[in-house]
Every structure is written in structure tokens, then in C-alpha cells.
Image (tube, helix red, strand yellow):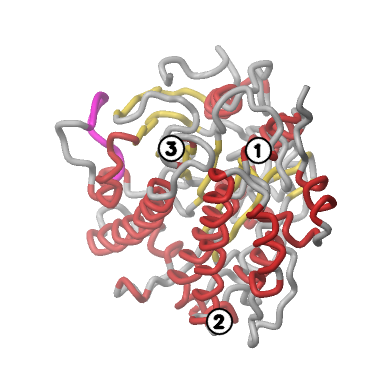
Amino acid sequence: MTQRLTRRKLLERLGIGSAVLPFLGNLPSLAAAATGPKQRLVIVFTPDGTVKKNFWPEGEGSFADRELPPILQPLTPYKGRLLTLKGVHNKVRGDGDGHMRGIGCLLTGIELFPGNIQGGGETPAGWASGRSIDQEIRGFLQSRPETTTRFGSLEYGVLVPNRADTWTRMVYAGANKPVTPVDDPYQMFDKLYGQSRDRESLKSVLDEIHEDLAAVSASLPAEDRRILEEHAALVRGFEQELAAHREVVAHAVPTLEQGILDENDHMPRVSRMQIELVVAALAADFTRVATLQYTNSVGEPRMKWLGIDEGQHGLSHEPNSNAAAQEKLTKINIWYAGEIAHLAQRLAETPEPGGSGSMLDHTTILWTNELGEGNSHSHEDIPWLLVGGGLGFQTGRALQFPGVSHNRLLVSLARAMGHHSLTRFGNPDYCGEGPLAGLA
């Protein structure tokens, strides 16, 4: 009986250092025996609701013979892989203002604890009283050898304010346990590849382990060598990107008291850098669950690169009769959709390591928001858009679930990732009939 060679045993046999380990995570010959294709989930958050008339498709049915609404236009190349879910409400009530409950209950499906954080005219509140669905899925995957990854989950941010409060956290490891997203691409790069580098010199990770990588490559099957070379090329490309734009990241984690201020002019570059790191981590099988959080609930980026000087949150409070504000909010959300489309593109053009098709075939991107609409602080019709084939849902269509609690969608996500024993999540009073019907 042939014994499978582990990553660490290979390094011991070759007499080389553990710095190479981050490059070996997704090599088929060194992986645990798999029971099926990889499944990945990336949850993307953007703030302050949407412009409903420009986001939601009319009615239900296939996207094949119709144009997408204005906000979703950047996703046109992937409309056969899209799924929109209208009518899924966040019904969780309790303490906290609309924004706080919007982000704090979005992935947890459960109430906030009482606390001393005051928001608007609502009662003060604290952290969420349960774990978020991404962490539930993480725990399930990490409990099985064939789906265990180095990190379990990774939490990325783009200009998340440098403060910890209920408006800035959507991921929870458990009750009263918010998880801070990493919104500095340099810091995330160091986390993934274990190298602490001076930002000015940016000494290459690959230069330091070039000989070790060559020794490993020579000992691998042809397919593994190809995957290793592709991953090394991706890392090299990102290092070059960091070197070319290292001045950008100096503004990635501003110290802000009242949200994102004018220091956010480099937001587009930080977003693209983080997207590259998401793709790198998934390709290397560092994780199969990731979140990407743009700013925060009550997010106030000023998207001057779109010709918009006002903050997003302020615009979102304007009445729907303010045509100029509605146009600007539409432009803002089109930009977010463009970032989702770029992530989908990068996954689509990256071959599935050790498998067939592209990584988008095995990855689902879920785009959501803490509000359905900003000026009403409504939790009805929360934007839920999915892209890709990781969950096995039937895509290329618009679905409606009028008045359905979003807890049922959270259950659906977990079960689609293989967590079949999960029947309720968050507050069980909102779980109703279990997972949503008709997705697969």
C-alpha cells in the first residue's frame, strides 16, 4: 500500500526550510484524499443599501434574453452565472440602530447583546450574540481532514475604519467575539506568506526561497509542478504590484473617528490588491471561506474618482425624489459591482488547481449589504447576489422569496457547502421551513 507523502515529510526528505510550505497547500499529490471537487465561498459586503429600481431585475426567470439592471451591468459577462434573490429580509430585531443591526445580524442571524454603543435614536447595543455563518462553515470544513486548510477562513477589508464597534464588524467567531478584517494588503501578504518585510525595500519572498522551490519542483509530478509555478508567478506579480504602488498602502488603514474621510482616494487600488490576494489564497488552498468588507456600516467613502464629492452615507439618506443623489448612488453601486466583476474575472481566468475548468466554476461570490435602502434604514429586500458555481445553485436567473427571513438563506449556504446537519442558524424563530427551496 502506497503511503501518501505529506508536505512536511517532503520538506524533511529534501532537507529544506518550512518557508516553502505556503506554496504547497494546493498540490494534489500532497493533499488529503478528496471526496469531491473543492467548494469555496467569498462573501463581499458593501454599505448603505442600494438603489432598488436600478439593482433588482424585473420579475423572475432567466437572464438569457434580457439586459441586466444598470447597477448590475458590469456583471454582464457573467450573467449566466448570476443569481439574484429578492424578498429575503433581515427580520432580526432588538437593540441597536438600523445600521448596527444590519451589519451585526447580517451573517449571524441573531440579536445584538445589550451594550453602551449608541446609534441614532435607537437603544444602545453591543456585539452580536452568536457566530456568523462564514465561521460556522469554517468550523465544519476544519473538522474534516479532506477540507482542512491552513487558515480556515480569511477576512479582508478595504478601508475599514481603524476602530472596533458594532458598525465596523460583520464576522463573529462566536457570541461577543467580533473578527477584525485585515485591510492593509501588506499585512495580509505577510500573513499569507510569513515574511515580515520593510515596506520600502520589499525584499522578495521568492528570491529568498528560490533554490528550495526548485528542489521541491524537481520532486513533484508534472501537474503539481505546473500548479506550483503558477502560484509562484502569481506571488511574483503581486510583489511587483506592491512595489509599484507601495505609497498607496500608507493610506490603507487611516486612523478615523467618524468613518472614512478624504484619505480614501486610493480605495480603487487597495481594492484590486486585496482581490489579488483573495484569488492567491484560494488558489493556494490557504482557505475555502473568505470575506471582503468594503468600509463599514454607515460607510462614508467619497468616490472622487467617479466625480462624486459627497460621502456615500450622506447620499444614501437623501429621499428617492432627489434624482441627482439617486444617480450618484447608482454610480457608486456600479463601481462596487465592477469590483465584484473583477473578482469573478480573476477567478474565471485562473484554472482550477489540480482539477478541470476555472476557479469560478468552484467558487461562489455572495454580494450583500446591511440595508435594503439607505434612507429608510429598511432591512427588507436586502441585496443578495451570487456569482459562480461553488455552491451548485442553478444560476443565470432571478428568483423571488417574498418576505422570507434571511436566516433560511444562511442555512442554505452552509448546507450547499456540505454542512448538511445544519437545519437552523441564528435565532431559530426566523428559520421557519429550513433552507430556501429551488436554489439547486
List the residue tagged with mark 1.
29
Among the 4 quarters of the image, the one containing residue 34: top right
Magenta stretch secondary structure, dominant? loop
| Residue depicted at 64% across the width and 54% down the height | 218
Q: CA distance from mark 2 to mark 3?
A: 34 Å
List the residue tagged with mark 2.
246
The mark closer to the camera, 1 or 3, is 1
- The amino acid sitting under disc 2 is Arg
Q: Bounds of the magenta span?
A: 55-63
Q: Element type at marker 3?
A: loop
The mark closer to the camera, 2 or 3, is 2
**Residue 384's mark?**
3
Between residue 217 and residue 168, name the one nearer to us: 217
User: How many C-alpha atoms fall within 10 Å of the one at disc 2: few (<14), some, or many (≥20)?
Assistant: some
Where does the N terminus fall, quadrant-wise?
A: top right
Query: Upstream in the sequence, badge 2 or badge 1?
Result: 1
Q: Element type at marker 2?
A: loop
Q: Residue furthest top?
A: 433
- The amino acid sitting under disc 1 is Ser
Residue 116 counted in the magenta span = no
Residue 362 percent location from the top left of the image: 48, 35
Between residue 319 and residue 139, name the one nearer to us: 139
